[in-house]
Amino acid sequence: MQQRLFELRRLRQIIQRTAASPRAHFIRAAAAIPPTPAAALKWRAAFPAGPYNHRMDILTLHRGTAPLLISLPHDGTALPDELAHRLTDSARRVPDTDWHVSRLYDFARELGASLLVPRYSRYVIDLNRPADDVSLYPGQNTTGLCPTVQFSGEPVYRPGCEPDDDEIAQRLTRYWKPYHAALESELARLRAIHGRVVLWDGHSIRSRVPFLFEGQLPDFNLGTAGGASCSPALQQRLVAILAAHDDFTHVVNGRFKGGHITRHYGRPQEAVDAVQLELAQLNYMNEATFEYAPQRAQRTQQVLRALLAATLA
Ligand SMILES: [Zn+2]
C-alpha cells in the first residue's frame, strides 16, 4: 500500500512537471497520446484550440487524418530581430524562400494530409540540412546549415556578422530540433494509425539559379534519393502522373535528389516512404516580384493534387 501511494505521488509529480514545461507540452502535443486521463485534462487545457491544430512560435503543425505528412521546411520568411540587422539589405528580403508553398499546398488539408510549416527563414537555419552540415551534394555548389551565401552568390551577412559555432549550436536547439521532433512524432502517429505513411517534402526554387545549376530547371523535380527513400511502386505512380501532364516538364532524381529530410526519414522497408518535390517557381508566382500568380498556380495545383492522391492510393 505504502509503495502504491509512493508511486501515485511520483506519477502526479511527473504530470505536474510535464504540464509546467512548454517544451513538454509541445512533445506531448506532437505525440497526441496523453499518458493518463489526468494528463489529458491538463493537456487539453493547455491547447484550447484542440489537439489537432496548434501553433507554436516557431512552427505550425496541422494534424490530418490520412497517412500523408507534408513538410514545407523553407516556407518561413521571419527573421529574429537580433539577426535581421546583421544581414545585408538583399538578404533581409529572404529571396531564397520557397515562396508561398504553404498557400500552394493548402488544398491538401481536404485530402486529410498533415502539414508542418516553420515560421523562420532558411537563413536562420536550414531545416533540410543534416545537423552536422555534411554537404548533400559533394563537389557541387550548395548552401549549408546556416547559409552565409545566397543563391545569387552574394553574402547573407554584413562583413564580420556571420554566426560562430556556438550560435549555430543554439540555432540547432532553438529551431532545428523542434521541427524534426514534430516531424518525427507526426510520422510515428500516422504510421501507428495507418500502418504506413508518406512524407512529402515540398520545395520550390527560381527556375534559373546559375550558382546551383545550368539553364532552366524542369517544372517538377522529383527526388527519392536515387530510389532509396520510397517504394518503386510509389515512384512509378508519381512518374506516370507527371508523364501524363505533358504541358509540364519533369525529371526524377536530377539536380535535386532529395535533401536531408527525404534521405533521413525515407525508410520504405519500414513503411515510411519519403519524396521530395522541387517545383520551378515560375509555375505559380512571379519570380521577380515574389508575387503569387493564382491562375498559374491553379494548373500546378491540379498536378499536385493528382500526385498527392497517388500517395494515398
Ligand atoms: Zn526548399
Image (cartoon, rainbow, N blue to C red):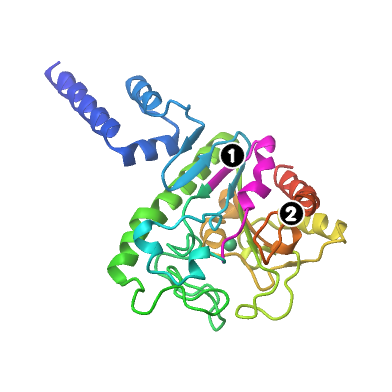
Q: Quadrant of residue 159?
A: bottom left
As drawn, is 52 to the left or to the right of 305? left
Residue named by callout 1: 195
Q: Considering the image in quadrants, where does the C terminus appear? A: top right
Residue 149: say if magenta.
Answer: no
- Tell me, yes or no, whether the two marked residues, 2 and 1, touch with CB atoms within 8 Å: no
Ligand 1 quadrant in view:
bottom right
Q: Is residue 125 left or right of residue 297?
A: left
Q: Is residue 221 visible?
A: no
Residue beneath the point at 81% across and 54% down? 241
Q: Where is residue 95 drawn, in percent x and y?
A: 57, 66
Please provide the residue range marked out in magenta: 96-116
| Depth check, front residue: 175 or 13 | 175
Numbered label attached to residue 293: 2
Residue 55 sits above or below residue 145 on the image = above
Q: Secondary structure at mark 2?
A: loop
Under circle 1, the secondary element is loop
Q: In the image, is 186 to the left or to the right of 181? A: right
Who's the residue at 79% across and 48% down the image? 302
In the picture, the quarter occupied by the N terminus is top left
